[in-house]
Image: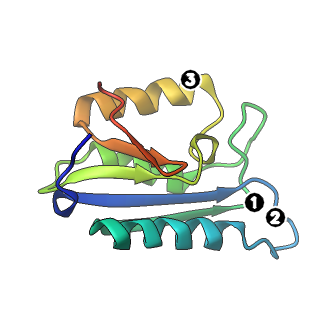
């Protein structure tokens, strides 16, 4: 797919499930990789959201305010096309019902999802 990258703005979501010690570099590495990709492609970063020590499985009980913020940002009208960037798909969610909700947002808004170095148009 060919995109005019200058017309896209990224919402970066970085998450690590288990960081009870507060020593994981995982989220900073995820963010650094996403920002590097955006710089290489000329994509503006609208917002960077970080969830440390927050699981995304059906067994997790912690609230995920940054994930909720990402969904709101993807749903909002914007002058540019929005794109969610996660290191891998499981950094956004691991629950089928959450995936379905996220997919609906992509379909309605036209937003893209980039992970593992690939850009996906979920509506297509």
Q: Say if mark 1 contacts mark 2, CB within 8 Å.
A: yes
Q: As rendered, which of 32 and 56 lies closer to the eye? A: 32
Q: Which mark is residue 53?
A: 1
Secondary structure of residue under mark 3: helix
Task: Give how far apart the Cα atoms at labels 2 and 3 are.
Answer: 25 Å
Asked if residue 41 is positioned above or below residue 102 in the image, the reply reads below
Q: Quadrant of residue 102?
A: top left
In percent of the image, x 43 and y 48: which residue is there? Answer: 114
Q: Earlier in the sequence, mark 1 or mark 2?
A: 2
Q: Is residue 54 left or right of residue 20?
A: left
Q: Crowdedness of circle 2 by 10 Å Cα count: few (<14), some, many (20+)?
A: some
Which residue position is annotated with label 2?
A: 19
Q: Earlier in the sequence, mark 2 or mark 3?
A: 2
Asked if residue 103 is positioned above or below residue 47 in the image, the reply reads above
Q: Which mark is residue 104?
A: none
Asked if residue 91 is positioned above or below residue 100 in the image, the reply reads below
Q: Earlier in the sequence, mark 1 or mark 3?
A: 1
Secondary structure of residue under mark 2: loop
Task: Give how far apart the Cα atoms at labels 1 and 3 are.
Answer: 21 Å
Which residue position is annotated with label 3?
A: 97
Q: Is residue 11 left or right of residue 33?
A: left
In percent of the image, x 52 and y 29: which residue is there? Answer: 99
Q: Crowdedness of circle 3 by 10 Å Cα count: few (<14), some, many (20+)?
A: few
Residue 68, percent from left and from top: 47, 48
In percent of the image, x 27 and y 69: which residue is there? Answer: 42
């Amino acid at each position: 797919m060919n995109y005019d990258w200058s017309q896209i703005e990224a919402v970066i979501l970085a998450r690590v499930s288990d960081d009870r010690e507060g020593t994981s570099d995982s989220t900073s590495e995820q963010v650094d990789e996403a920002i590097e990709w955006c710089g290489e492609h000329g994509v503006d970063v609208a917002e960077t959201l970080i969830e440390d020590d927050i699981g995304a499985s059906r067994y997790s009980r912690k609230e995920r305010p940054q994930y909720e913020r990402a969904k709101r940002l993807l749903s909002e009208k914007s002058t540019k096309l929005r794109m969610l960037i996660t290191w891998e798909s499981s950094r956004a969610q691991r629950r089928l019902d959450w995936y379905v909700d996220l997919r609906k947002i992509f379909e309605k808004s036209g937003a893209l999802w980039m992970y593992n170095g690939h850009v996906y148009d979920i509506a297509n």
